[in-house]
Image (cartoon, rainbow, N blue to C red):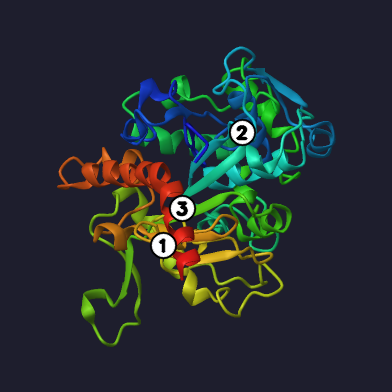
Amino acid sequence: MKSSYVVFVHGLMGWGPNDLGGLPYWGDAPAQFAPRFRTHLAKCGPLNSVHDCACELFAQIVGARIDYGESHSAQAGHARFSRDYAGRGFIDGWSADNPVILIGHSAGAQTCRMLQYLLARDFWGVGSSADWVEAIVAISGPLNGSTLAYRYCDEEQGKPKLLPSALVAGALAVVSALSSVGASRLYDLHLDHWAHEHDNGEAFLRRLDATRFVESGDNLGFDVTLHGAARLNQTMETFENCLYLALVSSATREGRFLNLPFLSARHRHDRTMDLTMRDSAAYIATRPEFSAPPTPDWGSGDLTMTLWRENDGVVNTISQRYPFIGRAHPVGGEGIFGFEDRIEPGQWRWHRLDEIFGRSFDHNDAMHGARMKPFEKGRREAQRELYRKIADFFAAFDASRDETIVRRQIV
C-alpha cells in the first residue's frame, strides 16, 4: 500500500473529536494504527447529505474552504461555500502517489464513496482522480440504505416527513443519551450553509425550517433510505484500482417468542444489543411493508423483504455487504481476513463481524459502543482487535499479493 494516512469518517448523527466534551466516537480504533499509519478524525454535518459531507471531508483533508459546487448548491438551495480549513489540512501533498485510506462507519461509508466519485470527476478543479483514495473500509454501512429510515421518511419518495427543526431535535436527543454533557451546547450541527448557527435556539431553527432542506432531498435522511441509496449507487462508481472492504454487523436472530410454536418467527435482538437500539431493531424486523416498491426491481432476489429483516439495530445486515440497489457493482466475494491472497482491487469484499469474533455486533459496537458496555467481558478488546486486523491487513497486503503472483507464475 502506498498510503500512510487513514481518515475516519462518522455517520448519521455522528460527531467529531471536538464535540460532546471529547467523547470518542471511534473508541479505541485510531490507536490501533500506530505507528505504521497516521490517523485523522473527520467532522461532517451529522444531518448533511452524502454529497455535502463529501465536500466537507475533502476540505478537511486537503486544507481548503468548503465548496459544495455551484450547480449543486443552486439546485439544493443552500450557500455554495462554508467553513475554511486552509492551513489545517490532514495531508500535505495529497495525490495518487500519496493517497489516503478512508474508513467510514454507517452513512460515513457512503460519504467516503462520494468523495472518491467527486475526486474522479475533479469536482474541485485540483487535478484529482479516483486514485487519490487507495482503499475504502465500510463498517456497518447502509450501502443500499436502511429500512429504519422509513420511520421518519415517507415510503413513496423517501423524503423526511419531519421539519428540519424536528430532525435536529431528534439528533440532539440521541447524542445526549450517549453523553454526560448537554448536546445542544457541545454538538456542532455543521449546517452553516443552510442557516447561520450563530442564530442560536429558536431563531436558528426557524431559519432552517424556511429552507429547502427537506424538499430538495439534499439531506442524510433521504440518502439513507432505499430510494436515496438507489440514486447514489446509480451515480457513484467502484473504481478498478481501489480496495473496497465491507465489515458487516448483526445483532438479531430469527426465532419465535419464548419458542412458542403457534407464533410466527421473526428477527429479535440479541441480549447484548444496546438498549437504545432494541426498539429500532424491532421496527426493521417487522416494518415497513412498502405499499409502493422503493425501486423498480423490488420483490426479487436480494430485494425481497424477508431478507431485509436481519439487522444490527440501525442498518439491515444485507445492505452492508456491497452496493447492489439501483445498479450492480463488482463483487469479489465473502471473506477479508485470512483471504488476502484472493482480494483484488475494484471489487467489493465483505466479512461478517460475528463470524470473525464469534459474537454479535450491534451498530455501534465497532465504535464508541464498545466503551458503553463495560460489564460485557471482552467487548472493548474485540473492538481494538478489529482495527488491529484492519491495520495489519493493509500493512501486509502488498506482500500477500506478490506471493500470490509468484505462485501463479510458477503454476
* Residue ranking furthest to the top: 87
Give how far across and how far down residue 163 sits, in percent: 64, 41
Q: Earlier in the sequence, mark 1 or mark 2?
A: 2
Tell me if 219 is positioned left or right of 138 in this view.
right
* Residue ranking furthest to the front: 410
Label 3 sits on residue:
402
Task: Tell me which residue sits at (49%, 59%) in the image.
Answer: 405
Kindly identify the amino acid type of the residue bearing the numbered disc 3: Asp
Q: Secondary structure at mark 1?
A: loop
Label 1 sits on residue:
311
Tell me if mark 3 has few (under 14), some (14-19) or many (20+) residues whose alpha carbon lies within 10 angstroms of its own.
few
CA–CA distance between discs 1 and 2? 39 Å
Label 2 sits on residue:
97
Give how far across and how far down residue 319 sits, in percent: 51, 62
* Figure quadrant of residue 303: bottom right
Task: Tell me which residue sits at (52%, 28%) in the image.
Answer: 43
**Which of the pair 296/392 is nearer the observer?**
392
Whether residues under marks 3 and 2 lie with C-beta atoms below 8 angstroms apart, the answer is no
Task: Tell me which residue sits at (25%, 47%) in the image.
Answer: 382
Give how far across and how far down residue 170 sits, in percent: 50, 39
**Which of the pair 181/376 is nearer the observer?**
376
Tell me if 36 is positioned left or right of 3 in this view.
left
Give how far across and how far down residue 400 sits, in percent: 41, 53
Q: Nearer the viewer, mark 3 or mark 2?
A: 3
CA–CA distance between discs 1 and 3? 37 Å
Kindly identify the amino acid type of the residue bearing the numbered disc 2: Asp
From what the image shows, is residue 383 above or below residue 42? below
From what the image shows, is residue 383 above or below residue 52? below
Is residue 86 visible from the viewing direction of this image? yes
Kindly identify the amino acid type of the residue bearing the numbered disc 1: Asn
Tell me if mark 2 has few (under 14), some (14-19) or many (20+) residues whose alpha carbon lies within 10 angstroms of its own.
few
Is residue 163 visible from the viewing direction of this image? no
